[in-house]
Image (tube, rainbow, N blue to C red):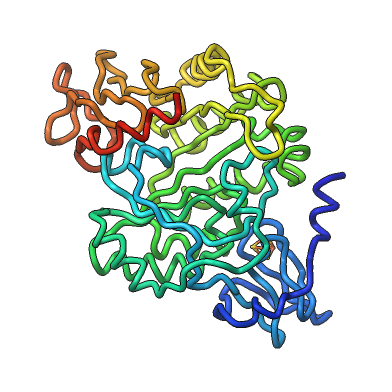
Amino acid sequence: MFYKIVKLIIVSLEQENHSSGKEAELFQTLPNGRVKCTACARLCEIPEGKIGLCGIRGVSNSKLQLFAYGRVIAGNIDPIEKKPVTHYRPGTNIFSIATTGCNWLCKYCQNHDISQRRKIEGLEMTPQEVVESAINQGSQGIAYTYNEPSIFIEFAKDCGVEAHKRDIFNIFVSNGYDTSESVDMMGKFLDCITVDFKGSGKEEFVRRYIGIPNSDPIFQTLKNIRDKTKIHTEITDLIVPDVGDDLESARKLCKFVYDELGPSTPIHFLRFHPDFKMMEFNSTPIETLEKHHKIAKEQGLLYAYIGNVPGHPLEHTYCPECKNIAIQRYGFAIESWNLDKNNSCIYCNYPLPILGQPQSIKNKYRKKLRFFQ
Ligand code: SF4
């Protein structure tokens, strides 16, 4: 199977990889001399002189090194709604960073030039410089995103600890393919996470299009985050037409979210756009996304959204009590809100579980949004 093949992709360290990085924290030395990386659920067992599947963690002198420590391949200012996150500090600017590499091999990845690059590249930045950049560009938070942040979690932690000293919050945009150890580390610095399911986590889909055996570790990650941390959590689900749009899988996911995380957990069904190795696919029909939204509501989830469809009425937050619009959006921009200073509905006084008061950034980002139409 595809996932078994990719599990064996442990390649030789390139000489240039030795020149940067820092010793990792999440690993165990095995009796056979290999080193087991515990940053993600791949749990690569890596021999001396080799690197793991993500391409940025490898063994040198019997220790696991994070070769991409301090190497930032991308840095952009995004609205938090782009992550997507809608119930945490709505309308704030986020400095979004990434390293190269990834622990998943998604055939549709929009960031494949970053995530599937198996070279250590990028601007050298200390955690202090990352935080300074965020502040200088008017950001209130830092997002670790574009590739899977758990693979560079030690660098993210050092940035995140510095960020907290300067009153800057931290967000992971994660595939959730994590371990108990990486969740423990997240608890030390992370304020918010959006966990991205793809194709509702259906096994056939994730095997064929991502290269993992199943989604079980993602569900476990969510339980670990719930039990061990105070991290605000949102769920996304990329709906891929024909191969990743199974309604029963979506129902199963929504039931899990309702039962294990609670009805107030936001869930976002995202529209797929053809990219990378899946150019022959169409964009997800809007009716398909609406069917997924309907299932979420039937399962009792109070805050379900459709994403990547600017102008759709299911981008807004609705008051669960009186059904009026609580936050009106267009794409990533907040247009208006009907909440008082405590984030209670101004029509019926229902308290919405949103952390931080909405801010409007529509003028700044409206032009960018047109790209997605
Ligand atoms: S982060 Fe995941 S993919 Fe990378 S070396 Fe560790 S276990 Fe392997």
In the image, 97: left or right of 25?
Answer: left
The quadrant of the picture occupied by the N terminus is: top right
The residue located at (50%, 61%) in the rendering is 73
Percent of width and height locating residue 15: 70, 80
Q: Is residue 317 above or below residue 1?
A: above
The residue located at (80%, 48%) in the rendering is 3
Q: Is residue 224 above or below residue 354?
A: below
- Judge by depth and name the residue closer to the eye, 63 or 335: 335
Figure disc tally: 0
Which corner quadrant of the image does residue 163 belong to?
bottom left
- Judge by depth and name the residue closer to the eye, 30 or 259: 30
Residue lying farthest to the bottom in this orientation:
61
Can the viewer see residue 229 in this picture? no
Q: Is residue 197 above or below residue 160?
A: above
In the image, 362: left or right of 177?
Answer: left
The quadrant of the picture occupied by the C terminus is: top left
The residue located at (55%, 80%) in the rendering is 22
Percent of width and height locating residue 227: 48, 51
Percent of width and height locating residue 91: 26, 39
